[in-house]
Image: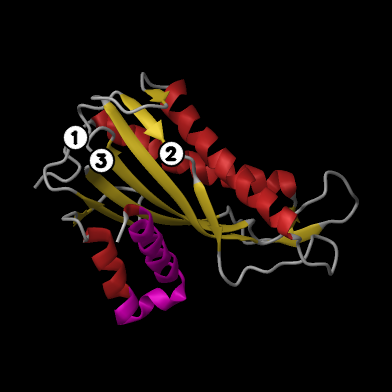
Amino acid sequence: MNNISRRSGLVAVLASALVPAAVLADAKSDFEATMSHDGLEKISIKGIDVAYAKPGATLAGYNRVQIDPVEVAFRKDWDPTKTGSQFKLTAEDRENIRTGVATLVHEEFVKALESKSSYKVVQAAGADVLRVRINILNLYVNAPDTKSAGRSRTYTVSAGEMSMFAELFDSESGEPLARIVDRREGRSSGMMQISGKVENTGQARDIASSWARILRDGLDRAHGIGKK
């Protein structure tokens, strides 16, 4: 199996395991096998649901970060209507949402790494370059707003949810250092609130920013993330 096929299979297993079926023993077993298949072992990272790392791995030698283009996939049962109407989203609408989320996640990681730290985001591999690959899985937008203007209003408890599957590699050797999965929901006050493009984007940025800060904090501490 080539690397592309293997990775596609890995992402598919994770996506299915991150929905309610994950409570089933078989799904849990597949998930754990997928996360640890190349020798990575389960560890604890504050603020992250599940993390695996190479025993003895450290981020201390990495001063620059290479971020692959972010991949985004919707939850399988997501089939909404346009906000304020009974019409389903078009393929173009769905693609605009998908690429929009991919862009904002990438932007938040770059911002977190470069704005308050000395890390540089680069495009090429190098001896001190950490490669980060991010997949957004099971994206679910409660009230997708495809209009630039309008009078219709939709009320929801939160904007929706998404999960991140991230992998950290040594950029030169391709050696896997860590594998991380985390699920987040949009902010919820417990009360109905207006939803729209601005609100949805803002909540998605908040989630992406929180993930990015965890990566930056890990680099700041530069401790052995898989050390026994």
Quadrant containing the N terminus is bottom left
Determine the residue located farthest toward the front in the rendered image. Answer: 2
Q: Main SS of the magenta segment?
A: helix
Q: Secondary structure at mark 3?
A: loop
Mark whose residue sits in front, 2 or 1:
2
Contact between labelled residues 1 and 2, with CB atoms less than 8 Å apart:
no
The residue shown at (28%, 64%) is: 34
Q: How is the image coloured?
A: secondary structure
Determine the residue located farthest toward the right in the rendered image. Answer: 151
Q: Position of residue 136 (x, y in %)?
A: 49, 53
Q: Secondary structure at mark 1?
A: loop
Q: Secondary structure at mark 2?
A: loop
Q: Using the numbered discs, state the Cα–Cα distance from disc 3 to disc 2 in whole angstroms.
A: 13 Å
Up-down relation of residue 142 to residue 178 (above or below)? below
In terms of image quadrants, where is residue 155?
bottom right
Which residue was labeled with disc 2? 68
Magenta part of the chain = 4-27
The residue shown at (62%, 46%) is: 99
The numbered disc on residue 174 is 3
The residue shown at (50%, 43%) is: 208
Look at label 2 and name its amino acid. Answer: Asp
Q: Position of residue 6 (x, y in %)?
A: 33, 60
Look at label 3 and name its amino acid. Answer: Gly
Q: Position of residue 131 (x, y in %)?
A: 33, 36
**Total marks in image:** 3
Viewer-closest of 97 and 144: 97
